[in-house]
Amino acid sequence: MRLEVSDLHVHYGRIHALRGVSLAVGNSEIVAVLGANGAGKSSLLRAIMGLAPVSAGRVALDGVDITHWPPHRRVRNGLSLVPEGRRIIMSLTVHENLLMGAFARHDAHTIKPEIDAIYDRFSNLSARRHMSASVLSGGEQQMLAIARGLLANPQLMMLDEPSLGLSPRLTAEVFALIRELNRRRGLAILLIEQNTHQALDLAARAHVLELGRKVMEGEPAQLRTDPALRDAYLGRSASI
Ligand SMILES: Nc1ncnc2c1ncn2[C@@H]1O[C@H](COP(=O)(O)OP(=O)(O)OP(=O)(O)O)[C@@H](O)[C@H]1O
Ligand SMILES: [Mg+2]
């Protein structure tokens, strides 16, 4: 599946948050979006998902214009978003949160084995499956959010700062999971990260947003040597 975003604009009233961004994510590709706070990264993912007000431009999946599709139709066609801040429903159990991820699917009989596989992988979630999601630690909540995103059975998963608030160890675990999903399942990934080094380790290509515009794009090796990016996001050690 190929996602193509062309000249996308997002307006929140008078705030022009995204100012003509274009990018593509190919089949089984990992693409990173980097940028400072307020650059428009979450707005970009939310617009691709149909959750932010697009004022101009186009979003296409395999050449089909989906710019005005409702979010659930995008989910049914292979897009999934793990939003910023996890958005776990604390009043539901872990298991109920997982089931919500599968809401748009019609193949009910294949969902149970997938949930079992998720419990096999995430033993902490399994042990707490009938407890309120509010008991989960930050890292467990992030795992639950990713697992819920996977239950939509996506072909392209968008992750909005999956390592936010996690310890280095859990961050490494989340990145290992992303890499494995990509390699084993061929899942395409559009990843937002403030953790620039690790995102560049994973991605085949990266885009840098600044004030709603794309200011740089390229392969990680290229971006790592770019003096402007190095100063802004990577710190001096990046050159070593
Ligand atoms: N619902 C909204 N209503 C009004 N303004 C918004 C809304 N959502 C985002 N914005 C504004 O749009 C701009 C881009 O926000 P966005 O959340 O896309 O940035 P971001 O790159 O994800 O930042 P961060 O790294 O802090 O998550 C910001 O100036 C923000 O204040
Ligand atoms: Mg954001």
Image (cartoon, grey):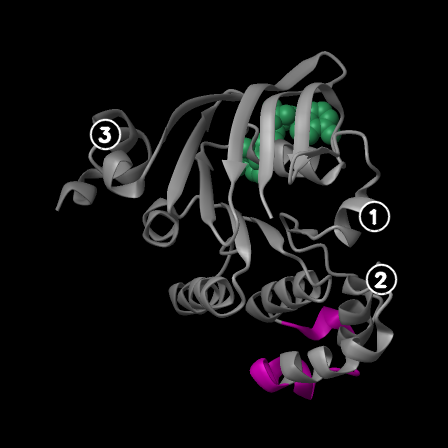
Asked whether the residues under the numbered discs 1 and 2 touch, taking CB atoms below 8 Å apart as contact, a structural biologist would say yes
Q: Residue at x 28, y 35 (%)?
A: 223
Q: Residue at x 52, y 35 (%)?
A: 24
Q: Do the numbered discs 1 and 3 sit on residues whose CB atoms are within 8 Å?
A: no
The yes-or-no answer for disc 1 within 8 Å of ligand 1 is: no
Q: Position of residue 185 (x, y in %)?
A: 54, 67
Count of marks placed on residues: 3
Sequence-earlier tag: 1 or 2: 1
- The residue where tag 2 is placed is 103
- Left/right placement of residue 88 relative to residue 177 reads right
The residue pinned by badge 3 equals 226
Of helix, strand and loop, which one carries label 1? helix
Residue located beneath label 1 in the image: 72
- The quadrant in which residue 169 appears is bottom left
* Part of the protein shown in magenta: 120-136
Q: Between marks 1 and 2, how big is the CA–CA gap?
A: 9 Å
Which of the two discs, 3 and 2, labels the residue nearer the N terminus?
A: 2
Q: Amino acid at mark 1?
A: His
Q: Residue furthest left?
A: 240
Image-quadrant location for residue 176: bottom left
Question: What secondary structure is marked by label 2?
Answer: loop
Do the residues bearing badges 3 and 2 touch, measured as CB atoms within 8 Å?
no
Which residue lies at the image location 58% right of the left edge and 43% below the top edge?
2
Disc assigned to residue 97: none
